[in-house]
Amino acid sequence: AVGIRVRVSEQGQSREWYQGTGPFTIGSAADCDLRLDGPSIPAKLLEVKLSAGRIFIRSLSPAKTFLGDLIIPADTYL
């Protein structure tokens, strides 16, 4: 099955989460599909979807969103 696998690593611990093609949201809000806890995690951080074999990531946060060393401007798809 085609889908998106997300691995969250923090302080030596990691967990994997699998979702179909999306779209799905990541953030600290209770209605996010993948909920992350922490004071620096905005309510709505990212939207992720798979389309035509490509993964699209959109920042939903008005603050700077980092994906590794890459900064994702708000409301921008990668």
Image: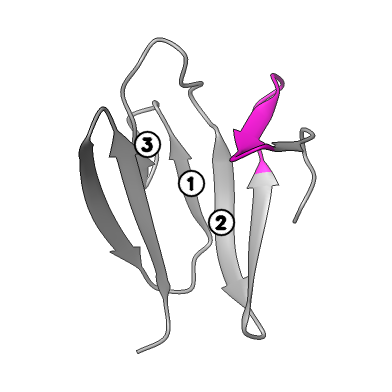
Tell me the CA gap for discs 3 and 1. Answer: 8 Å
Tell me which residue sits at (80%, 45%) in the image. 76
* Secondary structure predominantly adopted by residues drawn in magenta: loop
Q: Is residue 68 magenta?
A: yes
The label number, if any, that marks residue 47 in the structure image? none
Tell me the CA gap for discs 1 and 2. Answer: 6 Å
* Crowd class of label 2 (few under 14; some 14 to 19; many from 20; radius 10 Å): some
The label number, if any, that marks residue 48 in the structure image? 2
Query: Looking at the picture, which amino acid does disc 1 mark?
Result: Thr
Number of numbered tags placed on the structure image? 3
Image side of residue 13 versus residue 65, left or right: left
Tell me the CA gap for discs 2 and 3. Answer: 15 Å
- Asked which quadrant contains residue 69, the reply is top right
* Crowd class of label 3 (few under 14; some 14 to 19; many from 20; radius 10 Å): few
* Crowd class of label 1 (few under 14; some 14 to 19; many from 20; radius 10 Å): many
Disc 1 vs disc 2: Cβ atoms closer than 8 Å?
yes
Q: What secondary structure is marked by label 3?
A: loop
Q: Earlier in the sequence, mark 3 or mark 1?
A: 1
Which residue in the structure is indicated by mark 1? 25
Image side of residue 39 versus residue 13, left or right: right
Q: Is residue 74 above or below residue 8?
A: above
Q: What secondary structure is marked by label 2?
A: strand
Q: Is residue 74 above or below residue 64?
A: below
Tell me which residue sits at (67%, 85%) in the image. 52
Query: Looking at the picture, which amino acid does disc 3 mark?
Result: Asp
The label number, if any, that marks residue 31 in the structure image? 3
> The N terminus is located in which quarter?
bottom left
